[in-house]
Image (tube, rainbow, N blue to C red):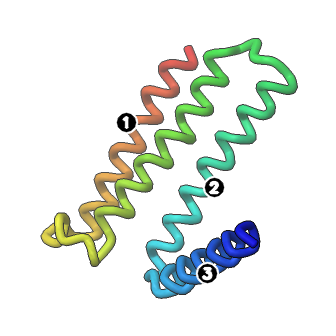
Amino acid sequence: MAPRSSSKDAQDLFRALWSAYAATPTNLKIIDLYVIYAVFTAFIQVVYMALVGSFPFNSFLSGVLSCVGTAVLAVCLRIQVNKENKEFKDLAPERAFADFVLCNLVLHLVIMNFLG
C-alpha cells in the first residue's frame, strides 16, 4: 500500500507544481525554454563525445562550457526579470537583458579564445 500512496503523492505534487507554473508570466517561460534548450544541447554533446570520442578535447570543452555558461546566464536573467523577486525591483528589464547580452559576448569571446 505504501508504493501506491507515494505515487499518488507524486502525482499530487506534479499537479500542484504544474498549476503553479501555469501562472508564470510568458517571458519567464520563454527564458525557461531557452535554459532547457542550452542544457539539452550540452547533454547531446556529452553523449556524442561518449559515443564517438573526444579527439579535439578543447572543442568538446568549449561546446559544453558554452552551453552551460549560457544556461547559467539565462537563469541569472530570469532571476533579475522576475517581478516577484524583490531583490532586483529597481533593475529595469532592459538593463537585465543588456547585462545578459554583454556577459554572453564576454563568455563566447573566452570560448573562442579557448578553441585556439
Name the residue that disc number 3 marks: 12
Secondary structure under tag 1 reads helix
Name the residue that disc number 2 marks: 37
Q: Closest to the observer: 17 or 5?
A: 5
Please identify the quarter of the rendering in which residue 6 is found.
bottom right
The residue carrying pointer 1 sits among few (fewer than 14), some (14 to 19) or many (20 or more) residues within 10 Å by Cα, namely: few
Q: Closest to the observer: 106 or 67?
A: 67
Please state which amino acid type lies under the numbered disc 2. Tyr
Describe residue 87's horizontal placement relative to residue 61 as left or right. Answer: left
Secondary structure under tag 2 reads helix
Q: CA distance from mark 1 to mark 2?
A: 20 Å
Secondary structure under tag 3 reads helix
Q: CA distance from mark 1 to mark 3?
A: 43 Å
Q: Earlier in the sequence, mark 1 or mark 2?
A: 2
Name the residue that disc number 1 marks: 106
Which mark lies nearer to you, 1 or 3?
A: 3
Q: Residue at x 48, y 83 (%)?
A: 20
- Residue 108, compared with residue 74, is above or below; it is above
Q: Residue at x 54, y 77 (%)?
A: 17
Describe residue 11's horizontal placement relative to residue 29 as left or right. Answer: right
Q: Residue at x 29, y 63 (%)?
A: 80
Please state which amino acid type lies under the numbered disc 1. Val
Viewport quadrant of the C terminus: top right
* Residue 86, position as x, y percentages in the image: 18, 71
The residue carrying pointer 2 sits among few (fewer than 14), some (14 to 19) or many (20 or more) residues within 10 Å by Cα, namely: some
